[in-house]
Amino acid sequence: MSVSFAKKTSPYPHWEYSNTEYDSLIRIVPERGGLITEWRSEGKELLYFDLDRFLDKDKSVRGGIPILFPICGNLSEGYLIGGKKYFLKQHGFARGLPWSIGLLKDKLGIRLKLSDTKETRSYFPFFFTLLIDVCLKEKSLQVSVKVYNHSQDSMPFSFGLHPYFQVSNTKKIKIEGLPEKCIDQTNMKVTNSSDQIRILDKGVDFLSYPSSSIKILDYLSRNVIELIHQEPMDTTVIWTDPPRQMVCLEPWTSPRNSLVTGDRKLEVKPKEYIELFTTFKHNSF
């Protein structure tokens, strides 16, 4: 098997997992929220990554694949657990904590692990473990997640990924597979998906519930990125941040504020776990 897994120091400290048979690799920085910073498929770099911003630890990351847990989006009014109110920052805390990393036993990918701490329990009062297996396949990245609840009570949560895909020009792409209607997250109003796609270069933030996969077709690079959903991680958010030439194509389990509204909220029973799956595929046309 032509795979390697090694710690590298350049152009920044990271772990690199590669498969020469597929001319593919991923780079991961476990200390920075288990962040996958790069994904190369058939020699092509697919992720957008702002290295200068990443090196400034006072700024939030713009690029790679941040991990969203235990909420997606924000919870501005907090949430109640056992009659006590708790507050979580945007997208939760997982993307800001150090994770551990290791090679999977079959060597087909890597495993990231995060467990609760005294600090996390102060704003999310549960004992938990997150295991994320990232497998590098031919022209695809497969992600499986296990969320374990070690507490005595049911644990509510949302989970998502926030991948930034680089594009040649946000005016020269097509997005296929979206339903006719979506929710504009800037005002939480229902609108037309086609209207949002027309203003990608102006900046969008919308959520939808597609019935199948979503594809980004880049007419200049001829790259196709496909997000293949699997229930319950089948909510899609699309976000752009001009003038950055990138599109975030994000699989979430639940919309923002779900811990309060109950909309698609997931709960893990005591001493049990929930498993989630999603796949990103790369092709050309």
Image (cartoon, grey):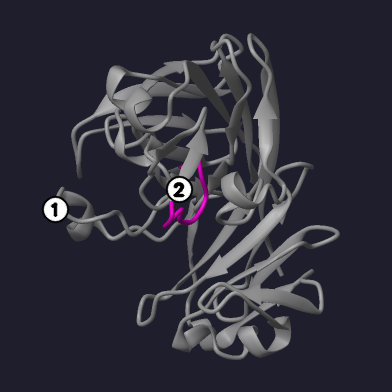
Q: Mark 2: which amino acid?
A: Ile
> Residue 147 bears which disc, if any?
none
Q: Magenta segment, principal secondary structure?
A: loop
Q: CA distance from mark 1 to mark 2?
A: 17 Å
Q: Quadrant of the N terminus?
A: top right
Q: Name the residue that disc number 1 marks.
A: 56
User: Residue 122's quadrant in the figure?
Assistant: top left
At x 70% / y 51%, what residue is drawn?
263
Q: Which residue is mark 2?
A: 65
What span is in magenta?
A: 68-77
Residue 36 or residue 148, whichever sits in front = 148
Residue that appears at 65% across and 49% down: 254
As drawn, is 133 to the left or to the right of 195?
left
On screen, 202 above or below 136?
Answer: below
Viewer-proximal residue among 249 and 193: 193
Left or right of 183? Residue 172 is left
The answer to whether 208 is drawn above or below residue 170 in the figure is above
Q: Secondary structure at mark 1?
A: loop
Return the x and y of residue 23 as percentages of the image width and height.
53, 41
Magenta stretch contains residue 188: no
Q: What residue do we see at 66% from left, 46% from top? A: 253
